[in-house]
Amino acid sequence: MFSIRLINRYILQRRSHLAMSTFVSQVNPVTGQMDWVVQDENYDYHQEVARSAYADMLHDYERNQMYDAALQDAVKIMHKKGKQARVLDIGTGTGLLSMMAVRCGADKVTACEAFEPMANCAAQIITRNGMADKIEIVRKRSTSIQVGPGMDMSERANILVTEVFDTELIGEGAIGTFSHAHKCLLEEDCIVVPSAANMYVQLVHSPHVKKWNTYQPFHSNHVSIDPPPEIASCPGAVALHDLQLDQLSEDKFQRITKPLKVFRFDYSGKSKIEFSGKNIVEANSEINGSCDAVFMWWDLEMDTQGKILLSCAPRWAHPTPRNMQWRDHWMQAIFYPSTQHQATRGEAMLIHCNHDEYSLWFDVGSLSSTLTPSVSPPICECGAHIANSRSRISMINDNARNQQFIDILSNVVTKESVIITLSDSTVLPLIAAQLGASRVFAIESNHIACKVISRFVDHNQLSDKVTVIGKKSEDVTAADLSNLVPTMIIAEPFFYSSALPWHNLHFWYAAVDLASRLCPDKSPALYPCSASIKAIGVNFDHLWKIRAPVDKCEGLDLSIFDKLIEDASDISDSLLEPQPLWEYPGKPMTNVVEMLALNINHNLSELSTISQNGHTELNTPGVVNGVAVWVEYNFGDTQTMTSGLLCSPQVDKPLKWEQNIQQGVHILKHPVTIACPSSTSPSSLHYNINFKPKTGEIEFKFDIHS
């Protein structure tokens, strides 16, 4: 263990660096141990700056142009009235909307920005674009602004422009922001950009979508798993499920209703914005089917006449489906009704729509039902939706995946097997017990997950074979196993602490530790028995925009912002970040390459650093703007489980990814265009990977050589 004196000495030695570093204690997701990590002392600050990149928002040309057009319209209206156009920009960020207002002829602009790094950046950008004398920056939240002579604003504004929306529309506090602005910061006869928002929902029938929220029974020839009634009937958490609905194949759901407008938020000030609201909408069912989910999206009326419309609708409901803007900052959302209603074609139904200041929730019933919708957001009372994410619930509900585990374990489990399962919220112990294992010990370190799996065990009458141990693996003792010696340690592997696919190699470290302590005479069999880290060069259609520099936006120079984000990202961001790639279309630019193969049966203590170098040729014309990385686990006899590609890539065909696990993605700072691959001097993606067994650290490096 490091002494405080040693730590202080190290910090002093680092003072010569441009940014002083310090030791930070954090959990290593691979080894599971607390590590001392050297970080820049302002790491949190830089991370916050890097994440404020607004990413694709500034690449959202439709959004930018519509804000510009609406501002032009607002300024003209004020000038026609013989008034000065006094603009307040709440949450100015880079200062883009404020500079647009100046360019549109605004007489006075006040830009409000509470996040100090962005306020400083906006000031520099505004100066770079020659507008420092026309825009005043107030470094406060809008709710703290004081109006009056000598105050933050000398007088109230008559034009408000702001972008305080998220996928849920109201989740960033839009209701409170607009309400306070009208009460304290704006003239009564003001113009607001945007002027209003409309929210839409559509009921769908979809067993596929339902698996993200509702625990399903699983039955095969050898294994039967039923969720406890209180878990199966739990409506789950109210939190929205945001995703790119356009990437959900239309054969995965059926539309029960047409899109329906359920809420309108008038930002103009002509009517009061309610902090909570309820609307009951009647709709006719177009099919027979269970009401499994509510799809939600919204649009913005940017101008006073509602002629400039910014829509976030999915393709099938979009007003201009052939000319849609891709967005990641405003996606669509799925909500799950609390009541399980079976719709009949032609039936009139009631959709109960509710919101408070920050949240939405929905329910469905027939005209004659005695449904009494909750006046507050529903909550998960079973614990299973608190312990597990949407993707993890879907993974547990994946029948094909469960059957694959049955096939794997059928070949190795016997009536003498004493098994430890190492994964979070896993049904592996139930499968192993039903396949005939003598005893199964399920290690669940999360106390909520421990209770959930215990309920599964009891409900499926397996408590005589399965013991759930609510401890961290390093704390498990022989007494916890009734002094039985395990013959096998198995895992999916899946752990809550894993952000990237290779973090699940934690199984290896935990299994080796357990084996050394609980069965020193004979090592138990480990499944999976090997792992392979793979990669592919990709031409992403849009994902690259989340990290791409802006340079100029609508003719305004934002390069200072690019430099701020790049510097902060270099300090705080990892080379690879987790992304659910099934939501982000991309085509292969290389073949799949195996960067590193690991034999999990090798003793970790005997391994030294493993370094591998290699390359794969760029074999098709196009742009290489990213590298995707994932892990495949081998369970023997050619049985593999992937966290990445589901099938071999085909040239000019979209890649197909595992939906329930995020992959690792490296977005190239400098994308490379391949006009025509050359057979004599081909371009290639070069990689370097270093695995340090002692620390569990895996380092990656990628380069394009042309």
Image: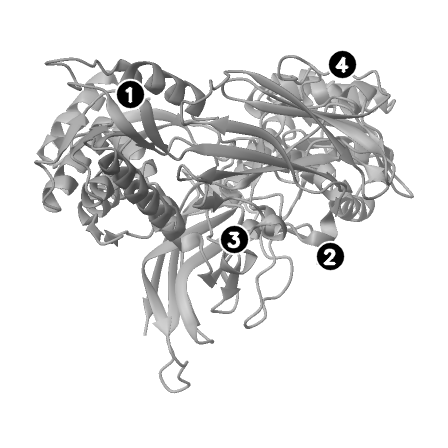
Q: Label 1 is placed on what type of residue? A: Glu
- Count residues near mark 2 (Cα–Cα under 10 Å), then give few for <14, some for 14-19, many for 20+: few
SS class, disc 4: loop
Q: Earlier in the sequence, mark 1 or mark 2?
A: 1
Q: Label 2 is placed on what type of residue? A: Asp
- Count residues near mark 1 (Cα–Cα under 10 Å), then give few for <14, some for 14-19, many for 20+: some
Vertical placement of residue 145 versus 671, above or below: above
Q: Label 4 is placed on what type of residue? A: Thr
Give me the C-alpha separation between circle 3 and circle 1: 44 Å
* Pair 4/1: label in front: 1
Q: Earlier in the sequence, mark 3 or mark 1?
A: 1
Q: Label 3 is placed on what type of residue? A: Tyr
- Quadrant occupied by the C terminus: bottom left
Mark 3 lies on residue: 584
Give me the C-alpha separation between circle 3 and circle 4: 39 Å
SS class, disc 1: strand
* Pair 1/2: label in front: 1
Mark 1 lies on residue: 187
* Pair 3/1: label in front: 1
Q: Nearer the viewer, residue 377 or 541?
A: 377
Q: Tags 3 and 2 in contact by the CB under 8 Å rule? A: no
Give me the C-alpha separation between circle 2 and circle 4: 54 Å
Mark 2 lies on residue: 637
Q: Tags 4 and 1 in contact by the CB under 8 Å rule? A: no
In the picture, residue 18 is in which quadrant? top left
Give me the C-alpha separation between circle 3 and circle 2: 33 Å
Q: Tags 3 and 1 in contact by the CB under 8 Å rule? A: no
